[in-house]
Image (spheres, grey):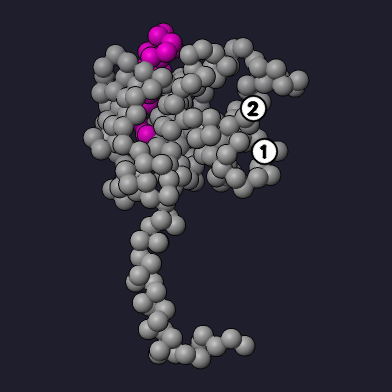
Amino acid sequence: MIEKFATLKAVAIPLDRGNVDTDAIIPARFLKTIKRTGLGTGLFHAWRFDENGTELPDFVLNMEPYRSGKILVAGENFGCGSSREHAVWALMDFGIRVVIAPSFGDIFYNNGLKNGLLPVRLAPGEVRALMDGLKSGPGGEVSVDLPAQTVTGPDGAVCGFDIGSFPKECLLQGLDEIALTLRLEGEIERYERNGQKKAPWLFLDL
């Protein structure tokens, strides 16, 4: 199961950079775990901290009020690079549930949907307007409505976005691939029982 997602209104973080790859999102040295928790400390580590581990004050996530932001607004091709699922886990562990960008790396986009993070594609001009508004008004809140497939900026401007019906329904119901499979547990067990009757030799312990 994943955390259900329907609507979210939260402080949005303007990350005015394009081609943010997964190594920037979570450097390789943090990939020694398969747990989904604790990775938030490594999020954007090279941009957040200097070589001594001291916060860099000019990076947006180290500024108030963005530390508690739950929506990230970024440039084109966000999440490009390697297929590491940890990039999604790190964002979510930090508290981010939505990333808005003109485009995404394909694998990152799908990893996000499968883990409960909503990647929202908006037109470049819409993202630029949203980004500029957030930078000129720090702390501005953005509303994301998944059922209606809309994003509402701090100025009230509303933008629509597309998402497939299947991933949308999975997010709304909080279903990952394992949970979807378990919904068919009865049918799977029935198939196994029928298989044992038709070909019992396949189930012999040798």
Q: Relative to 37, say whether 10 is above or below.
A: above
- Residue drawn at x 54%, y 13% as measured from the top left: 63
Number of marks: 2
Contact, CB < 8 Å: mark 2 with mark 1? yes
**Looking at the image, is mark 2 or mark 1 earlier in the sequence?**
1
Q: Relative to 122, say whether 188 is above or below.
A: below
For this orientation, the residue located farthest to the left is 148
Where disc 2 sits, the SS reads helix
Q: Is residue 61 left or right of residue 124?
A: right
Specify the principal SS of the magenta part. helix
**Residue 165 x, y percent position in the rendering:** 28, 48
Q: Which residue is mark 1?
A: 30
- Residue drawn at x 40%, y 81% as measured from the top left: 193
Asked where in the image residue 121 lies, by quadrant, the reply is top left
Q: Give the label on residue 45, or none.
A: 2
Q: Amino acid at mark 2?
A: His
Range drawn in magenta: 120-140
Asked where in the image residue 112 lies, by quadrant, the reply is top left
- Residue drawn at x 60%, y 28% as measured from the top left: 44
Q: Is residue 106 visible?
A: no
**Residue 23 x, y percent position in the rendering:** 62, 36
Q: Is residue 23 visible?
A: yes
Q: For the C terminus, which image quadrant? A: bottom right
